[in-house]
Amino acid sequence: MANPSNSVDEPRTSDRFNASDADVLIRSSDNVDFFLHKKNLECATGGFPPAETPSDLNEVVRLSETANILEMLFTCIYPCPFPSLEELDFDTFMLLVEAAEKYQFFGMICACRLHMKEILYPTDPDFNSNFTLKQDLHIKRIQLLQFAIKHDVRDLIEELRAILVNVSLSDLVEILPPHIYMPWSLYREQKLLERLKGNEELSVSKPKRPEILNLKRRNQVIMINF
C-alpha cells in the first residue's frame, strides 16, 4: 500500500507547459514540473537558465517559486496570452514582480511596471471617501517604493517621491537609503515651500467680501459728493 505522505510529494507535470520535445526541466517549490525549451528561455530572459545548465531532462532545475508564479512567468517565452494582472491580489502580484526581476523575464517586467501605474492611481469612485481604501493604498505605495529601491527602478522612485511628498521623512527614514534620502528630502522641502508660497499668494489675492467692497464704494461716493 502506498504511503500517503510520499504520494503528496510526488512531482506532477504542468498542464500547460509540458512540451514533448523539451530540453529543460524546471521544478517549482510545490513540486510541479515544467518541460520547456532552453532556447526560448535564453531569448526571452537575461541569462536564465544559466549557460551551464545542461539540455538534459535528467537534470532538474529547482526554483523557490510556486507553480502559480512560474506558470505566469513562462507565458513570456511562448506565443500565448499574458495573465490578467488586474485579477491578481496585491501579494501575489508582488511575488510575480520579484520573480520577474530575479530571473529577468523582460516581457513580464514591462507588463508588471505598467500595472504598477494602475495601482498607484486608483480609479475607484469611492476612493476619496473610504478611509480603508486610502490606508490600503498607502501600504501598497510603500511596498512599491521598497521594491523600486531594491531593484533601482529610478522612474518609479521619482514618481513615488511626488506621490508621497506629504509623508513625513521620519516615516521613511528606515526605507530610504542615504543616496535616495538626500534628494528626496530636498525635493520634499522644495514642494512644501512652493505650496506655502502659493497659499500666501492666494491669501493676498483673495477677493474682498462684498460688504467691504460696498463700503468702499459708498466712501468713494461720499468723497466725490463732498
Image (tube, rainbow, N blue to C red):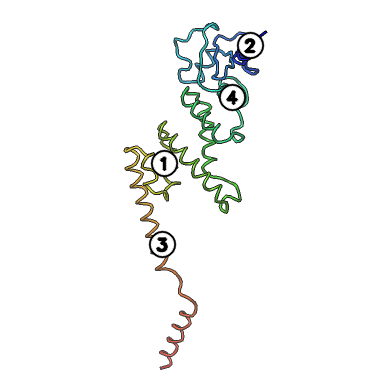
- Residue at 49% in and 42% down: 139
Q: Amino acid at mark 4?
A: Asn
Label 2 residue SS: loop
Label 1 residue SS: helix
Q: Which residue is mark 3?
A: 199
Foreground residue, 88 or 194?
Answer: 88
Q: Which residue is mark 4?
A: 68
Q: CA distance from mark 3 to mark 2?
A: 74 Å
Q: CA distance from mark 3 to mark 1?
A: 25 Å
- Could you say which disc has been placed on residue 215 in the image? none
Residue 47: percent from the left, percent from the top?
45, 17
Label 4 residue SS: helix
Q: CA distance from mark 2 to mark 1?
A: 55 Å
Q: Residues within 10 Å of mark 3 (few under 14, many from 20)?
A: few
**Is 35 placed left or right of 168 in the picture?**
right
Q: Which residue is mark 2?
A: 3
Discs 1, 4 touching: Cβ within 8 Å: no
